[in-house]
Amino acid sequence: MKEFQINKYITLKLENGRTNIYVRRELFRYCTILVLDILVSEISDFGKIQSIDELSDNQNDDLDGSSNDSISIPLDVIFWGHCSNLQAWYEHDYNTRLLHRNLSFPLLKRLTEVGDSLARRVFKEEIAKRFASYHLQTTEYLLNEGYLDYLNQEELEILIVNSNSNLKSLEEIQEIIDSGYFNDLNRLELLYYSKGRNLSIKKLNIKFIENFSAIFDQGFPITFVLNNRSILYNLFFPLIKKISKEDKDIKTLFLEDIDKRLKNPTLYNYEILNLFKEVFITGYKKQSVLDKFV
């Protein structure tokens, strides 16, 4: 078994033919992506390529290791390649441009959780910088995996201003939410609103429930909502709680609609429909409910 220590938090081990990453002596994951050993000073030499993510995406993910069957690379060479990449990443302050996003952000997040002061210092900064890079796959990844949820309201507002996003105003978003047409909002607007103010719907009615239910048939970004705690805590859970306290017709229609859809589950709505039903019945303060889905 070969072993290489990056710092007091990260260790790589070659075990059973694959490179495993350990954080504080606990297995984090095994490496599946080996991109070229690139110096930071050389990244600018790729022209418009500004990160390993862009290099990998531009080559149709041929660098994810799936094509290694046709190229015989000794395991120890692959292992030391991973070690070199992780070492460079650490020496350049966990610059997420130097590792594939599928590894750099989860690993950086884990390092903050175990008390790495450098990781804590750069975590939010890396999220903001990479989101503002306009690299579509990376910005979508950060949105879909809930990384923007780690930014507070002020940080999110700064990010939105710097990214020149054409977002609706809070007042416009409030009008849409009052109508129940959540599908008229994009993911960043939902996140922006959920961090900006408390839910203030004055009156729910049958039409609202019908509009709200329709979002599950129109490609609404359910995964994004599931991955962002602030949207669940500050928007959807209070809304479901309010529905549970409305008149009998509203409550009945809501539960009937959920039960009908649960009988014909689809990949994009089953989990969140179950979550909404459980929150409706038991409330949303129980951590056990959140742990199942978030």
Image (spheres, grey):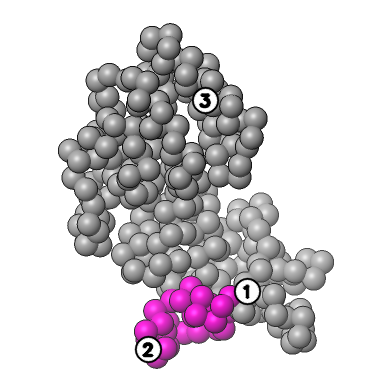
Report the amino acid beneath label 2: Gly
Report whether residue 151 is seen.
no
Residue indicated by mark 1: 64
Of marks 3 and 1, which one's residue comes earlier in the chain? 1
Of marks 2 and 3, which one's residue comes earlier in the chain? 2
| Image quadrant assignment for residue 197 | top left
Task: Tell me the quarter of the image containing the N terminus.
Answer: bottom right
In the current view of this chain or complex, which residue is farthest to the top? 248
Q: How many neighbours does mark 3 have within 10 angstroms: few (below 14), some (14-19), or many (20 or more)? A: some
Label 2 with label 3: CB-CB less than 8 Å: no
181 versus 47 height, above or below: above
SS at mark 1 in the image:
loop
Question: From the viewer's perspective, is the residue at label 3 or at label 1 nearer?
Answer: 3
| Image quadrant assignment for residue 3 | bottom right
Determine the residue positioned at 70% across, 80% down. Answer: 67
Q: How many neighbours does mark 1 have within 10 angstroms: few (below 14), some (14-19), or many (20 or more)? A: some
Tell me: 146 left or right of 157: right
Q: CA distance from mark 3 to mark 1?
A: 42 Å
Q: CA distance from mark 2 to mark 3?
A: 53 Å
Residues rendered magenta in the picture: 35-61
- Residue 18 position in % (x across, y down): 75, 69
Label annotation for residue 257:
3
Tell me: 224 left or right of 234: right
Label annotation for residue 47:
2
